[in-house]
Amino acid sequence: MPSRRLVVLVACVASVALFVRGTPAEEAAKLKPKPLRALLITGGCCHDYAKQKELLKAGIEARAMVEVTLVHTDDKSTKARFEMYENADWAKGYDVVIHDECTSDVKEIPYVTNILNAHKSGIAAVNLHCAMHCYRTGTDDWFKFVGIQSSAHGPQKPIDVTFVDRDHPVSKGLENWTTVNEELYNNLKLFDTAKPLARGKQDTGKVVDDYVVAWTNQYGKTRVFSTTLGHNTETVADARYLDLVTRGLLWSCDKLNADYQQPLKKGR
């Protein structure tokens, strides 16, 4: 009888412990980090944002513990505006903002200042392609945030992408590649806070242009990752491009680690 009572007692204790701790799957779920919250802003001139936003969302979420919220405007002009930017708390609740808009003729300084203030307060940022040509207010404010000042781009021709800082966490393990027809943005100025990760060479038929195409920037206390690649939808869909953007995003949030990176499946 004592042995039988002992067995029953042990079983009860184990049941209580399991109830308190949960199943192994539940315990693993508790240890899993919460996904980062990313805000992807798209719209404006010159690009197929309707398709590209979906490719970016799917590609990033497949590669990392990130939930991407989309804010899009169908305005295809260089004066496209986003109502949320009028609100001082427009980025509240997000860990990182992905700027993928093309609005070069939006120049009101209070509007642009409102955008920048969110990043000055510590919201991480990723800037893609035409974001580098936005908000030309006549000041360096936007360019200091981006890290590079650019004013123009070359023809639609392939770009040879070469990583020049292979020790940086973002570029570590990534391979050089040649894009499909793309726009190579010029570099009028590289700010001291920016660190080049990759350069792009493009044979225009007259000269071979060579400019920085991916870099990091320190904007006050905020990490910023940018790339001028990504004009054409075929580039945005390229796994190599999505790898670069995702790693840059995780780095900007200081989360480029195994906890937040998803294991890639074949063909992704």
Image (spheres, helix red, strand yellow):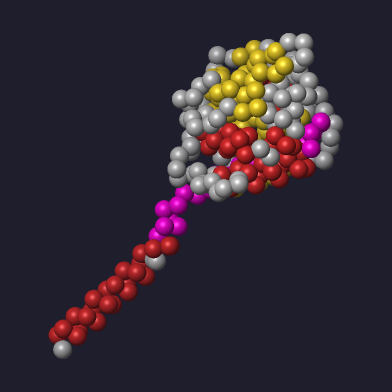
Q: Is residue 71 left or right of residue 94?
A: right
Instruction: Give the residue drawn at x 74%, y 37%.
Output: 233
Instruction: Give the residue drawn at x 40%, y 60%.
Output: 27
Judge whether residue 211 can be spotted in this image: yes
Instruction: Write down the quadrant of residue 243 in the picture.
Output: top right
Where residue 151 appears, as percent x and y from the top left, is: 74, 16
- In magenta, the rendered stretch is 27-48
Q: From the viewer's perspective, is residue 38 above or below residue 44?
A: below
Specify whether residue 28 is painted magenta.
yes
Judge whether residue 121 can be spotted in this image: no
Q: Quadrant of the N terminus?
A: bottom left
Specify whether residue 21 is painted magenta.
no
Where residue 46 appears, as percent x and y from the top left, is: 81, 31
- Please tell me which residue lies in front, 246 or 77: 246
Where residue 110 appears, as percent x and y from the top left, is: 72, 25
Instruction: Write down the quadrant of residue 80 in the picture.
Output: top right
Q: Is residue 192 left or right of residue 53?
A: left
